[in-house]
Image (cartoon, rainbow, N blue to C red):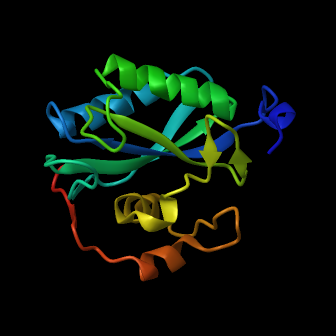
Amino acid sequence: MKADKLKPDNTDEVHAYIGIGSNLEDPLAQVTSACDALNTLPKSRVIQISHWYGSNAIGPGDQPDYVNGVAQLSTCLSPIELLDALQNIEHQHGRVRLQRWGARTLDLDILLYGDHTIDLPRLSIPHPQLDKRNFVVFPLFDIAPKLVLPNGEPLNTLTSELTLCGLWKLDQH
């Protein structure tokens, strides 16, 4: 998507899928609070939220397990406006970016923004690791089982290619 096409018209709502994760400072409370914050975004509304999943941490060092899920938003925010708003929510939740893939209080990633493909210095959509991360694919499948990715690949293809190894559904929602 070109930079001049990044802002939808005021009446154009786009469905965006947001990956949500935390492994510090009561992760379930962090992700739940993040969903409340998503509901306060201007020109946006949460449509649905996946089940919460526990997942083994990937990344450097010995980290606690994560709580992960996905929210579907309807938004009139541009991708960059949405990114800025998500990073603000992360900051409000005490997110500090010290180490790539390090432990964090909150991680909010734009996984998909409508059927757009975006490649900018600050933002790549679809999320570059979406197809490799079971902790994103399975929660996304919970809320959008018939979703087709911008490259034409059905989401259910990814669920058949990934395993549930290191991923478990949590009792609470």
Q: In the image, residue 152 lies at what x, y percent?
A: 70, 71
Q: Quadrant of residue 79?
A: top right
At 27% from the left and 52% from the top, the residue drawn is 52
Quadrant of the rendering where the N terminus is positioned: top right
Residue 77 image-quadrant placement: top right
Q: Position of residue 89 (x, y in %)?
A: 41, 23
Q: Is residue 173 visible?
A: no
Image height check: is 85 above or below 115? above
Q: Is residue 46 left or right of residue 76?
A: left
Instruction: Estimate the x, y position of residue 126 in percent, counting from the top left.
Output: 61, 53
- Relative to 109, is 162 on the left or the right? left
Residue 136 coordinates in the image, percent (x, y): 41, 58
Q: Is residue 158 above or below residue 24?
A: below
Q: Give the residue at x 30% y 22%.
A: 93
Q: Give the number of marks.
A: 0
Q: Is residue 24 above or below residue 57?
A: above
Side (left or right) of 47 relative to 99: right
Does any portion of residue 21 appear in the rendered image? yes
Identified at 60% across, 74% down, the residue is: 154
Q: Is residue 157 above or below residue 131?
A: below
